[in-house]
Amino acid sequence: MKYRLLLLLAALPSSLYSQTSKLEKWNTIDRMCGRVILVEKTITPLSSHTTERPLKKAEVLLYHRKGNKKCCTPEELVSETSTESGGGFELKDAGSGQYWVVVAIDKKRYRLAVTVGPSERKGDVDCSDLLYEVVKDGDMQLVRKTTYHLS
């Protein structure tokens, strides 16, 4: 029994590293752009419903991210903009590196760690295919929209 527990504990850190590594790859983007979408979930005893809508005039801020340091001090601010009517934004000041993307809505700030640099995806990035989903009273996540062409 002791050996099983020890083996499980030894495997745990590599499992966490693997998940972190996959998330880091997923959150690697070629350009700092996209669309901010608000996701609201309504759950009743009989059903659940999800509503998505683009956030217009939301504040988008970009901060340098250094290792495990906490986000976000004023001196780390790189760039800021507001979303357009369809939720779209682009921050052209972002060179390759690690950043925090912060979306401010109604005095609440949603943060997401991203890396700008060459990603594993081939071809040009269409900013409208990068969705920054903000879950009301929750977190923000990066969702990639993919279009498949059937021949």
Image (cartoon, grey):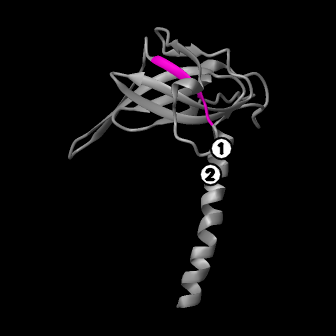
Q: Secondary structure at mark 1?
A: helix
Asked whether the residues under the numbered discs 1 and 2 touch, taking CB atoms below 8 Å apart as contact, a structural biologist would say: yes
Q: Is residue 48 magenta?
A: no
* Residue 123 in the image, given as x and y percentages of width and height: 79, 25
- Seen as rendered, the residue at the extreme top is 85
* Residue 134 in the image, given as x and y percentages of width and height: 43, 30
47 lies above or below 90: below
User: What is the magenta segment's predominant secondary structure?
Assistant: strand
Which residue is drawn at the image coordinates 75% and 31% (left, top)? 117
Quadrant location of the C terminus? top right
Number of labels in the image equals 2
Q: Nearer the viewer, residue 87 or 113?
A: 113
The three-letter amino acid code for the residue at tag 2 is Thr
The three-letter amino acid code for the residue at tag 1 is Glu
Q: Residues within 10 Å of mark 2 (few under 14, many from 20)?
A: few
18 lies above or below 122: below
Q: Where is residue 5, by image quadrant?
A: bottom right
Which residue is drawn at the image coordinates 59% and 27% (left, top)? 76
Q: Nearer the viewer, residue 59 or 46?
A: 59
In magenta, the rendered stretch is 59-65
The residue labelled by disc 2 is 20
* Residue 32 in the image, given as x and y percentages of width and height: 64, 22
1 lies above or below 76: below
The residue labelled by disc 1 is 24
In the displayed structure image, the side of residue 133 where residue 45 appears, left or right: left
* Residue 33 in the image, given as x and y percentages of width and height: 62, 20
Q: Where is residue 110, by image quadrant?
A: top left
